[in-house]
Amino acid sequence: MSGPNTNFDPVRVAALEPEALEEAVSTALAAAAAAAGLDELKAARSAHQGDRSPLALANREIGALPPSAKAEAGKRVGAARARVAEAFATRQSELEMERDARILVEEAVDVTLPTGRRPLGRRHPIELMATRITDIFVGMGWEIAEGPEIEAEWFNFDALNFDEDHPARQMQDTFYVAAPDEVVAHGQAASSHDGGHHDWPSSGLVLRTHTSPVQARALLERGVPLYVACPGRVFRTDDLDATHMPAFHQVEGLAIDEGLTMAHLKGTLDRLASEIFGEGTTTRLRPAYFPFTEPSAEMDLRCFLCHGTNPDCRACKGMGWIEWGGCGMVNHNVLRACGIDPERYSGFAFGMGIDRALMFRTGVSDMRDMIEGDVRFNAQFGMEI
Ligand code: DAH
């Protein structure tokens, strides 16, 4: 910037001459028009509108003019700068529109093209249900135990107080794997730790018909007090239809401690029912017979959908109750077979179908859908971890 003009006529300052201003404007307009892209425009703008541009310098010269000349010079410079600013703004929006149009073309997505998407795997709904149920037991402080699917007949029947001639032992119900003499000959006995004082090693082998044998295994392995849940696959010689499968899933519960009564059983079942089927779901016990419990009961579930109010209910078929499994107070003979003193310890046990629980909860009406392995079926149950 020049210093104050005191000894010459300051009106004629070169940078403020109309010709000079016109020249600066036309160079700036040409630069704006020539900018082929937004980056170029930015560079041109800083050359022609920036602090060191001829017009900015001219503007600064005004300050050194005598007051009488300031207004006129200010108008001229202002008009020149406005023209330049407008030219840059116009070019800016032209270039932005060009860019947007280009992006629309370049980045267009053909949503009809086939994708390389691979669907995520899912856990099987029965497995999900089993995990959900065992989680509930763990939440109550119970342990989880598992036993072999090929089971010693002794664990599956004898230890559970089944008579020699109990109908469940019939070939029609049970898949027999090996007779006692074959087991001895081939050393195939199911494994266990019972101190060797039982005759299971010489018993035959079956595909376990229920998860109850894990009761005896857990008692022998872990001793008392015992709170244990045993989920697993079981086998019966049933034909496959909508409501029967030769291989299905159960979860067994066993609690042995001092002073346990049927009230503890009922309370535990109600808690489980609420956790699995929704708060407030209760159970009902009906007298029944199982060799390994005395007294024994069938347990029903209050229909968690209609609570007994809908004659067309899909879950309870209008009955108001859903059959859920068996239960009872552990028979003294079972305790004795496992070396537990029934005078000191008592307990309860229950067993229910996992597949059935899944059917009630989800409205699956044909069990075969659950085992056919069609991923479209499994995928509907989502993914829980
Ligand atoms: N094991 C029985 C079954 O498969 C179910 C059962 C009934 C289990 C009573 C139990 C029980 O623990 O106490 O039909």
Image (tube, helix red, strand yellow):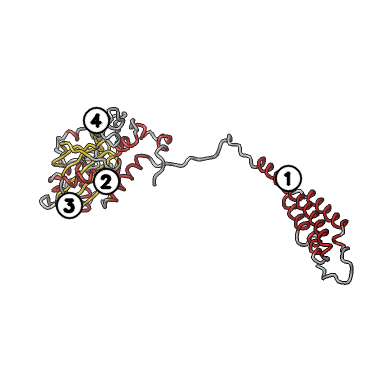
Which badge, 3 or 1, comes first in the chain's sequence?
Answer: 1
The location of residue 99, given as percent across then percent down, is: 69, 45
Task: Tell me the quarter of the picture where residue 15 sits.
Answer: bottom right
Q: Which residue is mark 1?
A: 94
Q: Secondary structure at mark 1?
A: helix
**339 relative position to 1: left or right:** left
Mark 4 surroundings: few (<14), some (14-19) or many (≥20) residues within 10 A: some
Crowdedness near tag 3: few (<14), some (14–19) or many (≥20) residues, C-alpha within 10 Å? some
Marks 2 and 1, Cα distance to the nearest angstrom? Answer: 74 Å
Residue 225 visible in the current orientation: yes
Q: Residue at x 69, y 42 (%)?
A: 102
Q: Gap between marks 3 and 1, in whole Å?
A: 85 Å
With 275 as the anchor, is 16 left or right in this view?
right
* x, y percent for residue 74: 80, 59
Residue placed under numbered mark 4 in the picture: 319
Q: Which mark is residue 230?
A: 2
- To which residue does mark 3 refer? 257
Kindly identify the amino acid type of the residue bearing the numbered disc 1: Glu
Earlier along the polypeptide chain: callout 3 or callout 4? 3
